[in-house]
Image (cartoon, rainbow, N blue to C red):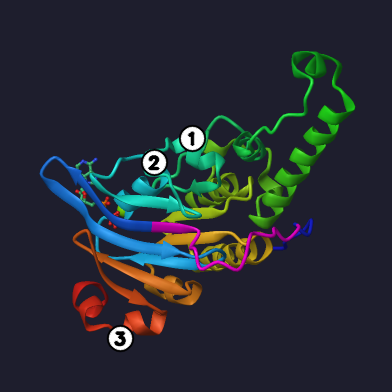
């Protein structure tokens, strides 16, 4: 695997203690079920944060609150300090929040490359329909840049050799990589990964770990990682938040979390 194309380092405003993402006292209910209860956590720019906990702890529900799939009954979600709790999912995606799903959802009939291309936001080249018709040089230049970015991501995700394969024909590990490629192609500020190693082999998980480290160092992308593979979480996260029954029961470095009695009781055993 390589990080070809030497993606430019993205400068983000420094000097403030403001986290990229802040979840403040979030509660989510489904009828009588309180899936997330008064949960708070934050993710600083460029950090890889783990979110772990038993089945049904509320991890995916919290992802849904952060990405705008559900609306919390209480609490606030902030992106770079701004309250985004009521912003729609598409708005958040445009401002740099991207995710993968517990179950992959690529467009099965599109090739691997087209799946990634389709996820790359069209930023426009000016000139409207007339420009499309005559293919203005600006348009052509932007289109070339888009295709270069797709090539770069395919290479990073180890997908170059299967770029023309319909995504629906891929084994699970490759399909997960396509989903990851789709999530990172627009250089998100915050990437949420929901159980990315489930159903994949150790070597593929290693590759995934390398990609996480690459995008965080090259693009200053922050990552929030939900994962049941505790060794993977411990290896790749700076800090880990632990949820149990919808509540945050512990937070700290991998070492601190491993030694936290409440976390051991509830999850690590
Ligand atoms: N759409 C929904 N309607 C009703 N209850 C839901 C819904 N989604 C989640 N829940 C409930 O909310 C709680 C948290 O579920 P969630 O899927 O967030 O857990 P999780 O931590 O992601 O679990 P897992 O590790 O199994 O993926 C569970 O009790 C679940 O049954
Ligand atoms: Mg889940």
Q: Nearer the viewer, residue 231 or 33?
A: 33
* Residue 69 belongs to the span the image colors magenta: no
Q: Is residue 85 above or below residue 9?
A: above
Asked if the residues shown at circle 1 and circle 2 are in contact, with their CB atoms under 8 angstroms apart, the answer is: yes
Residue lying at 46% horizontally and 39% vertically, measured from the top left: 105
Q: Is residue 157 left or right of residue 26?
A: right
Q: Is residue 85 left or right of residue 126?
A: left
**Magenta span of residues:** 8-22
Q: Which residue is the extreme one toward the front? A: 16
Q: Of marks 3 and 1, which one's residue comes earlier in the chain? A: 1
Q: Nearer the viewer, residue 12 or 2?
A: 12
To which residue does mark 2 refer?
68
Q: Of marks 2 and 3, which one's residue comes earlier in the chain? A: 2
Q: CA distance from mark 3 to mark 1?
A: 39 Å
To which residue does mark 3 refer?
259
Asked if the residues shown at circle 2 and circle 3 are in contact, with their CB atoms under 8 angstroms apart, the answer is: no
To which residue does mark 1 refer?
90
Residue lying at 27% horizontally and 65% vertically, measured from the top left: 243
The answer to whether residue 90 of the structure is visible from this angle is yes
Q: Exactly how many numbered labels are in the figure?
A: 3
Residue lying at 73% horizontally and 51% vertically, measured from the top left: 152
Percent position of residue 222, x then y: 53, 61
Disc number for residue 21: none
Give the dominant element type of the magenta stretch: helix, strand or loop: loop
């Amino acid at each position: 695997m390589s990080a070809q194309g030497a993606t430019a380092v993205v400068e983000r405003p420094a000097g403030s203690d403001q986290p990229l993402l802040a979840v403040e006292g979030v509660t989510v209910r489904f009828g009588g079920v309180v899936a997330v209860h008064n949960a708070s956590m934050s993710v600083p720019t460029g950090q890889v944060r783990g979110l772990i906990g038993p089945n049904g702890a509320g991890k995916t529900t919290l992802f849904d609150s952060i990405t705008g799939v559900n609306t919390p009954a209480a609490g606030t979600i902030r992106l770079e300090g701004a309250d985004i709790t009521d912003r729609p999912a598409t708005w958040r995606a445009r401002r740099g929040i991207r995710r993968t799903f517990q179950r992959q959802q690529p467009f099965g009939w599109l090739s691997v490359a087209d799946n990634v291309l389709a996820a790359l936001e069209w930023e426009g080249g000016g000139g409207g329909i007339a420009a499309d018709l005559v293919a203005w040089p600006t348009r052509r230049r932007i289109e070339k840049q888009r295709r270069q970015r797709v090539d770069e991501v395919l290479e990073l995700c180890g997908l170059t050799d299967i770029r023309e394969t319909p995504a629906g024909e891929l084994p699970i590990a490759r399909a997960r990589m396509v989903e990851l490629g789709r999530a990172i192609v627009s250089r998100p500020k915050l990437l949420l990964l929901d159980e990315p190693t489930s159903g994949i082999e150790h070597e593929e998980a290693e590759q995934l770990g390398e990609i996480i480290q690459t995008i965080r160092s090259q693009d200053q992308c922050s990552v929030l990682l939900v994962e049941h593979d505790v060794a993977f979480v411990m290896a790749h996260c700076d800090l880990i938040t632990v949820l149990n029954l919808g509540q945050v029961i512990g937070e700290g470095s991998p070492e601190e979390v491993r030694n936290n009695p409440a976390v051991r009781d509830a999850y690590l055993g």
